[in-house]
Amino acid sequence: MTLRRFLITLLFVTVGAGLWYAQEQEVRDRLSWMGVPTWERLTPLSFHRVLRNDGFLVGWSDVRVGPLWVSYALQVVDEPSIGPRPGFRGDWRTLWPVTADSYQSSGYDRGHLAPNYAIAAVHGREAQHDTFLMSNMLPQRPGLNRRLWQRLEEVVMDHFVPRFGMMQVITGPVFDARFTQGALNRVGLVEVPEAFYKILVVPGETPKALAFIMPQAVTGDEPLDRFLVSIDRVEALTGLDFFPRLSEPAAEALEARVEASGWGVEEVARRPGRFQ
């Protein structure tokens, strides 16, 4: 009887785990392109856990005490309905406590990686609430967060998405290569990045990509195209493989160079932000 009960329990656990994995994989495939980002070489600094939210995924590092990447999909929405900004709140899934007031008096803003406006417009109100989890934040200087970064987010949603119809976005931090040095620069428990990257991909038989790296020390008035880089450059600085299912020839074609033709970057590079 004991053996039978054990076998029945094992069967239920196995089936349940299989169903959970299938559902988890479906969500990851829907919110990422060519697989979720992973480490090129596993180290304590590159290891991360994938946190699933409504509308976006987070690659959370318990060493950096912040996300290494955030992945989400955008598409054209005819009549977006944006609710009022929710309040910031902690995320119980993070190993270390990062609260809504963790950045208080630090001189840094709570910088969104998955943006409030775009996620709310495409994925709805519950997803908008999730963008205000502190697991979606990193410390950003006001000149970056409120000006240059905000301008880039606005251009992505108002210019690039209508131009191409849909888009995959991966965004995250670039940390000091010397961890012992970078680890000293923290807001509470959260390590402060030196810069932030954003990768835009238009999927298709011949995908198109654009990538940016924006340092913390900006005024906010700089043209966006000043910060264009190759995806290979972002991977070299972060130690991440952003599209692990992409074949080597396809990755070489997509990631090795800066190819801005067809994006219309020059039309929006100096466009002022909505709140400037």
Image: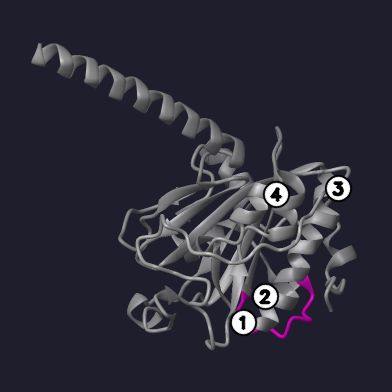
Pointer 1 and pointer 2: residues touching (CB < 8 Å)? Answer: yes
Residue 180 percent coordinates (x, y): 32, 79
Which residue bears the numbered disc 3? 163
Q: Nearer the viewer, mark 2 or mark 4?
A: 4
Query: What is the span of residues highlighted in magenta in the rendered image?
Result: 215-225
For mark 2, give the secondary structure: helix
N-term-proximal mark, 1 vs 4: 4
Which residue bears the numbered disc 1? 141
On whether residue 217 falls in the magenta region, the answer is yes
Prevailing secondary structure class for the magenta stretch in the rendered image: loop
Pointer 2 local density, CA inside 10 Å: few below 14, some 14–19, many at least 20: many
Pointer 2 and pointer 4: residues touching (CB < 8 Å)? Answer: no
Indicate which disc residue 145 carries: 2
Pointer 4 local density, CA inside 10 Å: few below 14, some 14–19, many at least 20: some
Q: What residue is at 55 percent from the left and 35 percent from the top? A: 27
Which residue bears the numbered disc 4? 125
Q: What residue is at 52 percent from the left and 80 percent from the top? A: 103
Specify the amino acid type for callout 4.
Arg
